[in-house]
Amino acid sequence: MKQRLIWLLALLAALAMPSLAWGEAAVDPEVDMLEVDHKLYELGYRDSACNGELDDVTINALRNFQAVNGLPVTGEADSQTVALLLSGQAISEQAYLTGIAQARSEQASLAEGSHGANVEKLQRALKELGYFKGNCDGAYGEATAAAVYRFQLANGLMETGVADGAVLLRLYEGESVDWNGFLQGSCAAAGESGVHVRRIQQWLKNKGYFRGECTGRYGEATQQAVKRFQSASGLESSGDADYATCEALFTDVAAMRSEESALRRGSEGEAVAALCARLTELGYLAGGSFTMRTELGVMQFQLASGLSVSGIADAATLAALNGEGARRAEDYDAPELGDYAGEGLQQQLLRMSGNCLGQQAGFADSLEFVEYLCLKCGIPLVKQSQLTAEAAAPEGEIPGGQILCVQAEGREIFGVTTSDRALVYCGENGYVVMRYLDVMQPEQIWTLTPGTAQ
């Protein structure tokens, strides 16, 4: 099967060749053309009525059959073609397409952060179809992800911004809808209904212009929403979703991409279970559900993989996480940290820790909580070895937003201070709590500063 698959893929060039002038196609006088028609239909090379004539439909079907089965591509019902066609050994169109789909599905997905010749090839193909306007530089950034998203939208694929096997198959081997054709088919006006209207409503809703139900009926509410969008976009406020309006609406995919396929704290289901299992497999933190601990694990992975550290498992993160080259926790080389001390950072830590109060975090220890806060505040990495510790007087004044390590109750507790000598930390019960330092009766207090350990 593997050899056959490779052989099939080698024939793609033949299918991609432009059609030549057919002229008079030859028919072997001994051939029953009605039988040939029926066999082409059975193998999937034609889907129209079988009439026993060597018309354009039959010639095109014969050419595709010959290309897939390794015969000279002539469009003629010659003896060699007919013999293979009737032998029961010919490759059907379905088997051929399945083989291509399988090969594409095994190819690594391309997502934000990818780079190289495959990305450049993708960009050029998208540019030819009108989806990509940037330079074909082989770097998969936001512009490329947005172009892929638009391609998926126009071609009936799940919109993720990730060039997976389905995208590559449709882009390189299928008959793709170009951007101009999609926009023309998306235009709508008051009184119309259908899938294209529902799509307009959904995009307007995600951009904050439409508040009703996406019914697919272009009524007064949709018309007013279109007018608001047109006014905000500098277009004539006609209320009709014309070509210019659809171009402005569907070109900016930022609002839609932020909603699609992303897993975040509070998400549930099989996708979250798979996310947690994969994070654990790669050595990152994860809870049994999408808790704050799982969010920390996602941030750790994003940091190690050079992705935007958001804690949201978006399409780019999931693609990198599930790819063959996913970075493991132990493979990450922590950079030297700069000096992060300062009132700005302290205010961020104070505000962030306050937002966490009373939440079930699921952290295994209080140091994980501090690492979570620091990553949320933009500090690249906080490990105990990267915290500069200075002893502090238990009775002395400690400013709010200061990271502390407190020796109390027979253990080390890591947290962030408030301005009134209280400590916000993750307790042993998994909840984020606040206790006054005086009540905790600390034996020792260390102030911790993210930076190169002394």
Image (cartoon, rainbow, N blue to C red):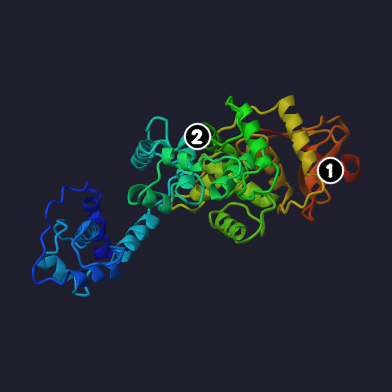
Residue carrying label 2? 243
Q: Tell us which disc is closer to us: 1 or 2.
A: 2
| Residue under pointer 1 | 443
Q: Position of residue 228 (x, y in %)?
A: 66, 31
Looking at the picture, tell me which residue is in the foreground, 163 or 249.
249
Residue plotted at (11% across, 67% down): 80
Q: Is residue 258 at least partly visible in the picture?
A: no
Name the amino acid type tagged 2: Tyr
Q: Is residue 234 left or right of residue 32?
A: right
Residue at position x 46%, y 44% in the image: 111
Residue at 37% from the left image edge and 32% from the top image edge: 137
Q: In the rendered view, does 372 fall on the left or right side of 139? A: right
Q: Secondary structure at mark 1?
A: loop
Residue type at mark 1: give it: Glu
Give above or below for 364 relative to 446: below
Q: How many marks?
A: 2
Question: Which residue occupies the foreground of this view, 66 or 335?
Answer: 66
